[in-house]
């Protein structure tokens, strides 16, 4: 119901819907309109998992996987992440300078880290040629301590030409691995962003990158880990299947009913693939049990965040 209001107790929940407005080539304009949920059932569906988290539960972790879309909806992303108050964020497409999909040069990773008062590790995958202040990379943010961190190169770092001239399928790619300690739990948190092609089909380069990532997970052996990422490939693909040979894909469990992680109105595929694509996943070692997993419809990116509550058992 547009223009209405839903009150539950003393709480009023207000969301936005995103409408994609045609704009010039290489540009996406997003206008936001107020959306008030129309029933107690809708309110419960949106908030039940978020409100189930008790930060005092020593063995429970809240994880959010998010592609930041080069800061296009940074304010919405920060609002959502503040409300969720996660223990771990795995973040991709964190940019600065002329790599941003916005009118300012803000460092997207630093803005989120500072707004949420979190610690973090960021590794850039590329910078623009001649402009080291314009770059893109991946990050892990946490409320715990980062004991050590490393970058796994899926396709080596390079300085690149502007986006409209870029060979995207062969762009630099990486994953990062942070050893984290939080509330007595010690585990690896990884963030990954794998190769993209216009059509989501397996290619030798995509399989090669997935193999590097799977091999890294194998090297962790019995160490606990959580891997979040934008894999740019759907469930059932060779890329996702390769990671599933090592880690547990908690997003595809039919209990959660998650069928898409591309935003239904903002993502560039919305007009010709209305059912969406599920390309963002969280994988874990056997040390974690998912208690709830969902992909809330919020205007934080052109991808939906993946939100998970995990029980930890060393």
Image (cartoon, rainbow, N blue to C red):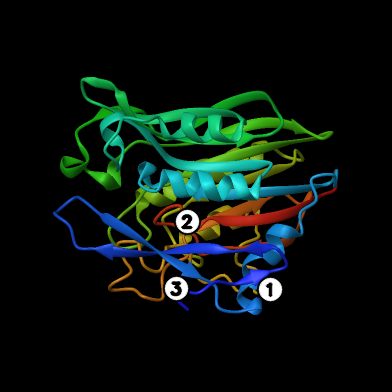
Distance between mark 3 and mark 1 Cα atoms: 33 Å
Would residue 273 be found to the left or right of residue 241 on screen? left
Q: Hey, which quadrant is residue 42 in on the image?
A: bottom right
Q: Position of residue 10 (x, y in %)?
A: 70, 63
- Can residue 153 be seen? no
First of labels 3, 1 by sequence position: 3
Q: Nearer the viewer, mark 3 or mark 2?
A: 3
Instruction: Count neighbours of disc 1 (C-alpha within 10 A) and say few if under 14, some if 14 to 19, many if 20 or more.
Output: few
Residue hosting label 1: 255
Towards the viewer: 116 or 64: 116
Residue hosting label 3: 3
SS of the residue under disc 1: loop
First of labels 3, 2 by sequence position: 3
SS of the residue under disc 2: helix
Towards the viewer: 290 or 248: 290
Q: Contact (CB < 8 A) between labels 3 and 2? A: no
Residue at 43%, 59% in the rendered image: 233
Q: Contact (CB < 8 A) between labels 3 and 1? A: no
Distance between mark 3 and mark 2 Cα atoms: 44 Å
Q: Is residue 180 above or below residue 171?
A: above
Q: Nearer the viewer, mark 3 or mark 1?
A: 3
Residue at 62%, 56% in the rendered image: 307
Distance between mark 2 and mark 1 Cα atoms: 23 Å
- Can residue 221 be seen? yes
Q: Nearer the viewer, mark 2 or mark 1?
A: 1
Residue hosting label 2: 239
First of labels 2, 1 by sequence position: 2
Q: Is residue 177 above or below residue 19?
A: above
Q: Position of residue 257 (x, y in %)?
A: 60, 74
Q: Hey, which quadrant is residue 107 in on the image?
A: top left
Would residue 239 be found to the left or right of residue 117 on screen? left
């Amino acid at each position: 119901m547009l223009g209405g209001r839903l009150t539950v107790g003393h709480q009023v929940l207000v969301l936005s819907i995103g409408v994609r407005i045609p704009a010039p080539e290489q540009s996406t304009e997003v206008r936001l309109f107020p959306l008030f949920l129309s029933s107690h059932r809708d309110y419960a569906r949106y908030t039940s998992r978020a409100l189930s988290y008790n930060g005092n539960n020593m063995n429970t972790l809240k994880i959010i996987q998010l592609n930041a879309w080069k800061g296009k909806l940074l304010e919405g992303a920060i609002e959502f992440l503040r409300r969720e108050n996660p223990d771990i964020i795995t973040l991709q497409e964190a940019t600065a300078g002329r790599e941003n999909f916005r009118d300012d040069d803000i460092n997207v990773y630093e803005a989120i880290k500072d707004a949420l008062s979190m610690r973090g590790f960021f590794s850039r995958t590329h910078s623009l040629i001649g402009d080291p202040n314009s770059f893109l990379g991946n990050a892990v943010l946490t409320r715990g301590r980062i004991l050590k961190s490393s970058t796994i190169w899926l396709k080596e770092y390079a300085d690149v030409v502007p986006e409209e001239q870029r060979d995207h399928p062969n762009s630099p790619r990486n994953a990062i691995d942070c050893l984290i300690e939080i509330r007595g739990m010690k585990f690896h948190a990884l963030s990954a962003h794998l190769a993209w092609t216009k059509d989501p089909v397996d290619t030798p380069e995509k399989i090669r990158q997935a193999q590097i990532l799977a091999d890294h997970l194998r090297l962790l052996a019995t160490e606990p880990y959580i891997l979040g990422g934008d894999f740019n490939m759907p469930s059932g693909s060779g890329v996702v299947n390769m990671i599933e040979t090592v880690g547990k894909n908690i997003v595809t469990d039919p209990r959660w009913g998650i069928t898409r992680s591309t935003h239904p109105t903002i993502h560039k595929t919305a007009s010709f693939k209305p059912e969406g694509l599920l390309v963002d996943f969280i994988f874990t070692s056997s040390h974690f049990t998912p208690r709830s997993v969902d992909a809330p419809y919020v205007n934080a990116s052109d991808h939906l965040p993946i939100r998970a509550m995990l029980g930890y058992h060393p």
